[in-house]
Amino acid sequence: MTVDALLAGDCWDVLGILDDDSTKAGQKILGVPVFDPAEDFSKLIKKLRVDAIAIGIGDNYARDKKFRHVRDHGFKAVNVIHPSAHISRFVKLGEGITILAGATINPGTVIEDNVCVNTSASVDHDNHLEKNCHIFPNATLTGTVRVGQFASVGSGAVVAPNLAIGKHSYIAAGAVVVKNVPEGVIVAGVPATEIGQQQKRPEW
């Protein structure tokens, strides 16, 4: 999907895909060759004559690891924005953001580094998406919602206005959130209630 968004935008020449699964090396995805990054990363990037890198990973923690890896090697993680996404000119975007087909981002919203707003998600006015969070397909954030670092809002979930989603928390698919969600919990249902703890944390 990341490759598709880059190709649809017609702003970049996509030279290759790096995949940790070495069995995919030598294959092509959407006509783009796959390389094994197990070989020296810097040499591979030099060989491909790369100017920038886009990160195509859905998992917040793996995406954060790769984002840091890219920066450590002196590269910029580019913003991947599908041309069918609608983004107000009054939105503030960070670095390494992915916004996929049909997504809507309305005025006053701030999106920090390495956030993914997935297919047809709706992010209304004055929301704040902190680093490394993920808004899944068809999820809806109404006005003035803050989503914490590494939090995920599942497919089709709806978050009512003026609420905060704590960092590391997970909103299950189809949930309707009508009150603040604490840090590090999993909520589900209509209305959403806590059903467990989200134990995953970044390696660093």
Image (tube, helix red, strand yellow):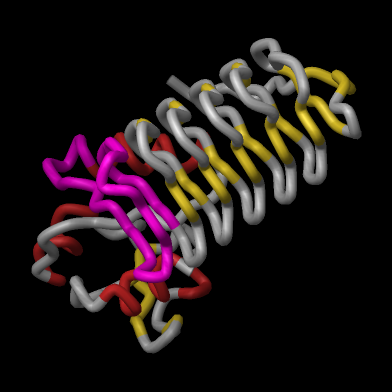
| Image: 113 above or below 75 | above
Q: Residue at x 85, y 19 (%)?
A: 194
143 or 9: which is nearer to us?
143
79 is within the stretch colored magenta: yes
Q: Which secondary structure dominates the residues rendered in magenta?
A: loop
Q: Residue 120: percent from the left, percent from the top?
A: 57, 59
Question: How many labels sit on residues?
Answer: 0
| Image: 1 above or below 60 | below
Residue that sits furthest to the top in the current view: 182
Q: Quadrant of residue 32?
A: bottom left
Instruction: Locate residue 91 relative to residue 30 in the image: left or right.
Output: left
18 or 7: which is nearer to us?
7
Q: Residue at x 28, y 52 (%)?
A: 79
Q: Residue 38: percent from the left, percent from the top?
A: 35, 57
Instruction: Locate residue 132 relative to residue 162 in the image: left or right.
Output: left
19 or 199: which is nearer to us?
199
Q: Residue at x 63, y 55 (%)?
A: 137
Q: Residue at x 19, y 72 (%)?
A: 11
62 or 111: which is nearer to us?
111
| Image: 30 above or below 113 | below
Q: Residue 189: percent from the left, percent from the top?
A: 90, 33
Q: Residue 201: percent from the left, percent from the top?
A: 58, 22
The magenta segment is: 71-99
Quarter of the C terminus within the rendering: top left
Instruction: Locate residue 121 relative to residue 104 in the image: left or right.
Output: right
